[in-house]
Image (tube, rainbow, N blue to C red):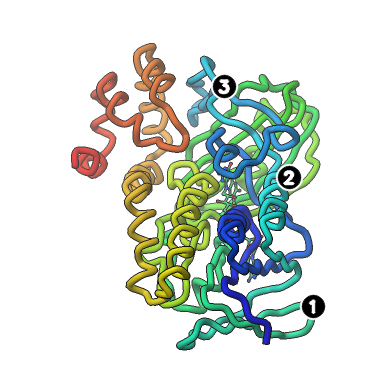
Amino acid sequence: MEQYEIAIAGAGPIGCYIAEQLASKGRQVAVFEEHHTIGEPIHCAGLVTRRVLDITNCSQEDIVQNTIYGAIIHSPKGTLLTVGGNKVHALVIDRQKFDGCIARNAQKAGATILQNHKFITAKKQHSGVTLDLQHDELMMSVHCQLLIGADGAHSHVRDSLGFPQPIEKLHGISAEISDTLLDPKYVHIFVGRTIAPGFFAWVIPTNEKGTTARIGLCIGKQHTHSLQHYYTTLSQQPLLQGATIMKRFGGTIPLGPLKKTATDHVMIVGDAAAQVKPTSGGGIYPGLLCASHCSIIAEETFQKQRFDEEFLTRYHTAWTKEIGRELSLGMRFRSVFARLTDSQFNKYIQKLNTQKTIEAINTYGDIDYPSRLAFPLLKTAPSLLSLAPTLLKRVKQ
Ligand SMILES: Cc1cc2nc3c(=O)[nH]c(=O)nc-3n(C[C@H](O)[C@H](O)[C@H](O)COP(=O)(O)OP(=O)(O)OC[C@H]3O[C@@H](n4cnc5c(N)ncnc54)[C@H](O)[C@@H]3O)c2cc1C
């Protein structure tokens, strides 16, 4: 049986980033990926901040398709709220190229990436973990001292080893379109029960001319129609008239980070651990932050030869300390947001549409840390406090 110090399930950005970090320390790392091609199938809108490229050491060239300066929010009755415009707030990336860059970095550092190797299940033993994998039609087993589950929203590692589940899983649909006439500097966000109940829909220009875009939406439990129905509603928006659909894809966003992400010989990270911003569904940045902690603790594990749950729980403590509060505030906000009716959306978007609140959003808005906007926003528009007493209670703590 093949033996590795570290086995990682999933060659997404999080698994490959951890592989690179640990291989560069001289660890023997194998990454098992179920698909034949890294970065496929795509399930991402590709909107990130520059922090993501800084962490991963991926150069902007090739990967960044467009820069975003602001957002135009569409209320259910069609009122527009325009925010930003003053500076670059986000980058639109080519996810396949981004994933490819991190995978190449991992390989350069000495990690082995084995594509077409699907993780099926694992058995913990005193000396480590035995993994059962499927390669083509064949079953095979490998042994490792440390297993890292970075196998995405539907993680088999999480499920087969009895970790808790994310609180919620949102289903999404997305498409690459062309022949659009968009302002390339602005993303469009549509809210309301008619278009994306429980979440929102988006239109993201993917080139500097505004002639191509990525559109999509996610829905929560509140939906009364199929995902396809809401997708049709989005694609019929006047903004997208004359557009051609090039490619469609789906995906799942796990929300509500796991209460436990480590056990003897095993850690869970990224989407597998639902380390995702509940307000936007963005998982690349928080996943990478957690991946950094995972890599540090994994290295210490080998140095100290401590593979027990008590030691590995240091990873859980470290990532919770860094972004646990941000994610839990996000879940609070989300629970209020998901219950808003269309008339409440209309009312609150109108309340936000003042020069003072827009200035506050432009100054403090940060898609990686949305909670930083809460206090400045409430200061400029105290009437927003009526949004939800539960949210207020939490923010005060
Ligand atoms: C519609 C949609 C839009 C999104 N938009 C954004 C966005 O704009 N910005 C943002 O930051 N985030 C976005 N996200 C979230 C983002 O895509 C994820 O947070 C990110 O991909 C998480 O990375 P990961 O490596 O943890 O998981 P993944 O990227 O899902 O990678 C997991 C890897 O594991 C592999 N795998 C799965 N099961 C197995 C198995 N059994 N054996 C072996 N390999 C396996 C998969 O093939 C995959 O390669 C979006 C998600 C969706 C669904």
Q: Identity of the amino acid at label 2?
A: Lys
Q: Which residue is mark 2?
A: 97
Dot 1: within a 10 Å radius of its alpha carbon, few (fewer than 14), some, or many (20 or more) residues?
few
State how many labels appear: 3
Residue occupying image coordinates x 62% and y 69%: 28
Q: Secondary structure at mark 3?
A: loop
Alpha carbon of mark 1 to alpha carbon of mark 2: how far?
Answer: 25 Å
**Which numbered disc, 2 or 3, marks the residue that appears first in the sequence?**
3
Dot 3: within a 10 Å radius of its alpha carbon, few (fewer than 14), some, or many (20 or more) residues?
some
Depth check, mark 1 against mark 2: the one in front is 2
Residue 235 visible at all: no
Alpha carbon of mark 2 to alpha carbon of mark 3: how far?
Answer: 23 Å
Q: Secondary structure at mark 2?
A: helix
Residue occupying image coordinates x 47% and y 34%: 367
Estimate the x, y position of residue 385 in percent, counting from the top left.
24, 31
Residue 34 visible at all: yes
Q: Which residue is mark 3?
A: 69
Image quarter in which the N terminus is found: bottom right
Left or right of 233: which side holds 342?
A: left
Among the 4 quarters of the image, the one containing residue 388: top left
Report the image quarter containing ligand 1: bottom right
**Which numbered disc, 1 or 3, marks the residue that appears first in the sequence?**
3
Question: Mark number for residue 136?
Answer: 1
Estimate the x, y position of residue 270 in percent, counting from the top left.
51, 57
